[in-house]
Image (spheres, rainbow, N blue to C red):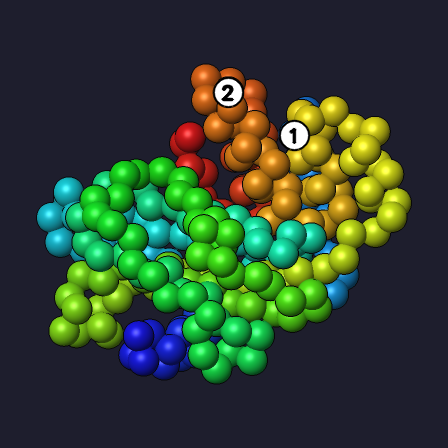
Amino acid sequence: MKYLTALVWSSIAVLALSMPMPVLAADANVPVYNPPKRGAPAGRVGGGTRGGSQRDVFVLAVLAPDHSGFTTSEQPSLYWYISSPTTLPIEITVMDSQGIKPILETRISAPVKAGIQRVRLADYNIKLAPGAVYRWFVAVVPDAERRSKDILAGGAIERVDMAQELKAKLAKSKTNETPFVYAEAGLWYDALKSISDLIDAAPQNQELRQQRTALLTQVGLPSTHE
């Protein structure tokens, strides 16, 4: 993974984006993400497609905003997306707050199905310190001997304290309202987890899937068609 560390920072320098503020959802029935007024810029980098035959082409993206996304969780879930199944090796890396060394390096067992994927940091006993910005990456590895061919996508995450006002608001909210509350409070990862948990509990509910899609498109992410 030494190569990945070098590739990470070169990718940040080359691929860091400067996207406009997200377009607010016009539909009152979808969560509206309110980006925090502070936080590191260029939180999302990379992603892309693999060339070759049609069956080898896919889109890879981390489900993160283009800035340091907030969470109140010590062990949050991280989400990423791949448009087609793959049997290629996939590696997940979380860098420490100094960006010097990984606090998590793991390989996901192939094959990986198409769609939205979840990485639970609790599964690896990884805990985020409050106030620190971490970077996390998904790498698809077409050739283990030529890591320059890796397809890399990454995002940034920062753990913040939950305001008392937000705690009170959540206590009064119904379960299906929590994604709206988190999104309004600028807590990207918490909003995404809460809507994804609702979908996991009711996978046939198309309204919930539309809400998640709306949330993703507000930060410039591609529609997942899920």
Q: Residue furthest front?
A: 125
Task: Please give the name of the residue rendered at 26% of the width and 66% of the height, measured from the top-left corner.
Answer: 150
* Left or right of residue 182, residue 116 in this image: left
For the residue pair 2 and 103, the one nearer the viewer reads as 103
Callout 2 secondary element: loop
Task: Please give the name of the residue rendered at 72% of the width and 59% of the height, measured from the top-left corner.
Answer: 160
For the residue pair 5 and 53, the one nearer the viewer reads as 5
Q: Amino acid at mark 1?
A: Val
Figure quadrant of residue 107: bottom left
Q: Residue furthest top?
A: 204
Residue 209 point in image, percent of width and height: 51, 27
Residue assigned mark 2: 202
For the residue pair 188 and 32, the one nearer the viewer reads as 188
Task: Please give the name of the residue rendered at 57% of the width and 54% of the height, measured from the top-left corner.
Answer: 75
Residue 120 point in image, percent of width and height: 47, 49
* Left or right of residue 37, residue 176 in this image: left
For the residue pair 204 and 125, the one nearer the viewer reads as 125
Single out the mark in the foreground, 2 or 1: 2
